[in-house]
Amino acid sequence: MTDPALPSVEAAGADLRAFVDASPTSLHAVAEMARRLRDGGFTPLDERDAWSLAPGDARYVVRDGGSLVAFRVGSAPLAEAGARLVGAHTDSPTFKVRPRHDVRRAGYRLVGVEPYGGVQFHTWLDRELTVAGRLAVRGADGEVADHRVVLPGGPLRLPTLAIHLDRGVREGLVLDPQRHLVPVWGPELSTEPGLLEALADAAGVAVGDVVGHDLVLADTQPSAATGSDGTWVAAPRLDNLSSCHAGTAALLAASPAAHTAVLVANDHEEVGSASAEGAAGSFLADVLARLVAATGDHDPQSYLRAVARSRLASSDVAHAVHPNHADRHEPSHAPALGGGPVLKVNANQRYASDALSSGWFAARCADAGVPLQEFVSRADLPCGSTIGPLTATRLGIATVDVGNPVLGMHSCRELASAVDVPLMTAALTACLSLP
Ligand SMILES: [Zn+2]
């Protein structure tokens, strides 16, 4: 049965849109997840401190701003009951601002950027863009701290070249990121402040104290309800903020249990996950090992026993069947927008799902009254991958890959269905609540 406490489709869609709009970057997404967790009684932990944890404790820890692990400690030792985990990633394809980004050309000032991840270039054209991320700021004590920042308004733009000047465009639009995808910021006026000056101003810090930055482009058009019945969600970054949103809601809604409930949200999936806070890094393994020790279990076998008793549902978006390109889907596996969570399977381990992990997720969906769809790639098309196989490889943890269906994956503006939002939240809540 679906939990009657779960929000309506309309409310769930509105909440997803608010989550996405509050999260122009992975750093802002983690801040928004942390805010929601704090509102639900979770308190922060710092990796630099010694941890001491007791059953029922609800805590979260952030690594380098863009990755988060949150958990509710179970009533039984981890070595005896293991953990139930939900995974997601916080980053999305975009463009990263270069160290020397002040470009002047043809009477314009532009901002030098390079692509981050698998950007669908053409979808970023002719949109009101901004710059967001963080500044590293030197304090009076010489320490360096980071400040999240968003440039106000939508002052940047990647203008399309007029068709009159590109007669071959009907045969295919060619966009070289080095030459053609440098956003214009304004006219070349020597009196205007630079980008870092404008961002320091927005962050309320002195530009002379800014010693570094992680900044990316973000679309500024608010997310919208769309479609004939208003149940579709048009928004940027649904890959994979939709899973961060559902995972956070699931952890907040999960029932206390013998096992420990864990949410892990990693940065850097779109660029391969190989970083200190990415899924190929040590973050989750470090937190789980410390969870075992911090609850008073110092047996060297206990961490490995805990992992062997654990299961991970790794949620990342799935390809809904595209009505104008239905032939790109395997005919028997064509997930529909609004049809519920999608189980992702691949013979070559591009997804980690196997009989037992898939069966676990299917059983929890059935418990929650949630329909389950299935996706495989066509045999003649390569299959994408995600954090699930990486986490399974890194930790040796039983993992299933799932996700809500979207159209236009990696577009600057993707499309999902609000119908799927409470369904995925209910499925993940059941995964965290039940054996
Ligand atoms: Zn993704």
Image (cartoon, rainbow, N blue to C red):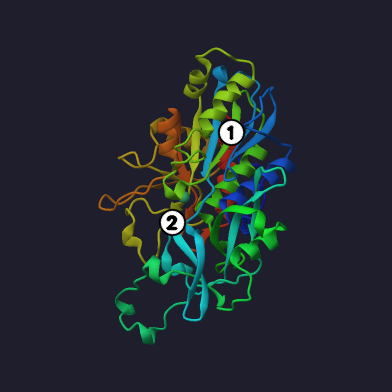
Residue lying farthest to the bottom in this orientation = 164
Q: Relative to 256, does residue 196 appear above or below in the rendering?
A: below
Q: Secondary structure at mark 2?
A: loop
Percent position of residue 190, x then y: 59, 76
Q: Is residue 261 visible?
A: yes
State the image quarter where residue 56 is shown. Answer: top right
Percent position of residue 78, x then y: 58, 21
Q: What residue appears at the point 60 percent right and 72 percent down from the top-left corner?
A: 155
Residue annotated with mark 1: 262
Residue annotated with mark 2: 320
Q: Is residue 328 left or right of residue 410?
A: left
Q: Secondary structure at mark 1?
A: strand
User: Badge 2: few (under 14), some or many (20 or more) residues near its Cα, within 10 Å?
Assistant: many
State the image quarter where residue 433 is shown. Answer: top right
Mark 2 vs mark 1, foreground winner is 1
Q: What residue appears at the point 67 percent right and 50 percent down from the top-left corner?
A: 7
Amino acid, disc 2:
Ala
Q: Relative to 270, does residue 298 appear above or below in the rendering?
A: above
Q: Is residue 357 left or right of residue 5?
A: left
Q: Relative to 398, does residue 78 appear above or below in the rendering?
A: above
Residue lying farthest to the left in this orientation = 380
Q: What residue appears at the point 32 percent right and 59 percent down from the top-left corner?
A: 328
Q: Relative to 120, does residue 419 appear above or below in the rendering?
A: above
- Image quadrant where one finds the N terminus: top right
